[in-house]
Image: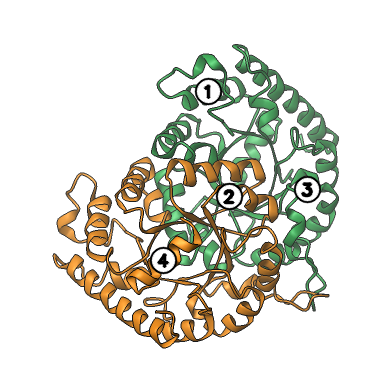
Chain colours: A orange, B green
Amino acid sequence: MTKQELLNQIKTKKSFLSVGLDSDIEKIPAHLKNAEDPLFEFNKAIIDATAEYCVSYKINTAFYECLGSKGWKSLEKTVDYISKEHFIIADAKRGDIGNTSSLYARAFFNHLNVDAITVAPYMGKDSIEPFLAFKNKWVILLALTSNAGAMDFQFLQLEHSKKKLFEKVISKSKEWGTEENLMYVVGATQANMLTEIRQIIPDHFLLIPGVGAQGGSLEEVVKYGMNSTCGLLVNSSRSIIYASSGNDFAEKAEEEAMAMQKQMENLLKSQQLI
Amino acid sequence: MTKQELLNQIKTKKSFLSVGLDSDIEKIPAHLKNAEDPLFEFNKAIIDATAEYCVSYKINTAFYECLGSKGWKSLEKTVDYISKEHFIIADAKRGDIGNTSSLYARAFFNHLNVDAITVAPYMGKDSIEPFLAFKNKWVILLALTSNAGAMDFQFLQLEHSKKKLFEKVISKSKEWGTEENLMYVVGATQANMLTEIRQIIPDHFLLIPGVGAQGGSLEEVVKYGMNSTCGLLVNSSRSIIYASSGNDFAEKAEEEAMAMQKQMENLLKSQQLI
């Protein structure tokens, strides 16, 4: 998907919501557990219920890998089921030396055929470039994450440049891609850092996880992170997909997604973007 | 596998060789490509040919993931096929927020049942701890990698501590685990840094990739990186598994692995470790 197509989807749906398919075999409703492929049945119902209100699905690969090849089958079926109007993110946090990253790129962009993959920056340029070589596919690079461990290394102050590590990761890596193939992960719990980040990358899309169960605020994210074309994908996982653990899980997920979409519509209007 | 069991294997086999199963569907001998599971057939032959000369197998997950669920099946069969005397490393470079890392730990330590997984440090403590919670399983944390991109962030000089980022990653993370469950990746192309690294972690095992096709020298690695109990696993992938692309690929792999083992035996003797 191109940047323009993604922006068109945001305008059409009046939403910049990404629904996170963190589908945990231990948390899905009991009545689905006897299905032949419980994760896929759960995802299908969640996708049917939320497709109208979101522009993206983010699939956290760990939830599928913990079931091995069977889980990867559910992952493949889920990606196939999502309409091509949605921007599909494999939240896989991969990254390796060049020739290995090329294989991960093949895995996610050719075999699975998702639009974007999250990538960890530690191994530098040649670990990221193979992903950027795919046309109309995206790298979403970890910049500042939403977890407590973000404090351990990402905030380290560097000598000479006086930057923090995450700022250096952003300023260096933006030379490797463009606004058409490179986004950044910035946790919603780090909304106070968005002003600094927008000074380095005013125009890139940001993927913001951590709104909802992890405690981030949508208003703050928009206030400090939205740019002149929107430039945000805000992800919610648990607060939508586990809104209910009963037979009504899909209806409750729909209600949650619709409520998020309404909130986003108001925010887009307040920024005169729709 | 415990540290003592690994050391026993090293003494018994007179080897600290890890064979990297970077098994590429596009590079394996033509006569195997029509097999029902070509990657597994290739691995089986390589394992049979090299098991006597190595103490470890390192499986690079990218080579399997690029075939999707089918590749994961080959990965599962390969792990099952390797004898429990060998230390099995999933070179997967995972790492995510705590609850997601727990699922990756389940994927690799419960479902696949490997001994160790490589993990990227960028997301900090809570991204690594869930792996360390598994008894007799290991985290192998990326410290200093063998690729050109290692220069981009790993060598950044930090303010205050005057350390480089990779040194900080090592000194901080060693508080999270022990010599019994935490190793570090240090590329063989970075042998000149091993003296500094051994000052921070004299007793931890190091996994050293990059000897062979990537140009690292085994003598230098041993000179600067070996400790009083050995403390090294040196990995070779391409130079062993693709020693020949013909029908004799397994014999040639055996010859290469045997040559590496002999070299290692001499080095272990020269250090009076056997």
**Residue picked out by circle 1:** B42
Tell me if label 3 and label 2 are in contact, CB under 8 Å.
no
- Give the farthest residue toward the top: B247
State left or right for residue B226 relative to residue A236: right
Q: Secondary structure at mark 3?
A: loop
User: Which residue is painted at 72% across and 46% down in the image?
Assistant: B231
**Chain under callout 4:** A
Tag 3: residue type? Asn
Classify residue B100 by image quadrant. Answer: bottom left
| Number of marks drawn | 4
**Residue picked out by circle 3:** B227
User: Which residue is painted at 53% across and 64% down in the image?
Assistant: B127
User: Which residue is painted at 64% across and 72% down in the image?
Assistant: A154
Q: Is residue A120 visible?
A: yes
Q: What is the C-alpha distance between the residues marked 3 and 2?
A: 38 Å
Question: Can you tell which of label 1 and label 3 is closer to the viewer?
Answer: 1
Bin the neighbour count of mark 2 within 10 Å (Cα to Cα): few under 14, some 14-19, many 20 and up: many
State left or right for residue B164 relative to residue A194: right
Tag 2: residue type? Phe
**Residue picked out by circle 4:** A8
**Chain under callout 2:** A
Q: Is residue B88 visible?
A: no
Q: What is the C-alpha distance between the residues marked 2 and 4?
A: 24 Å
Q: Secondary structure at mark 4?
A: helix
Work out whether disc 1 and disc 3 sit on a shared chain: yes
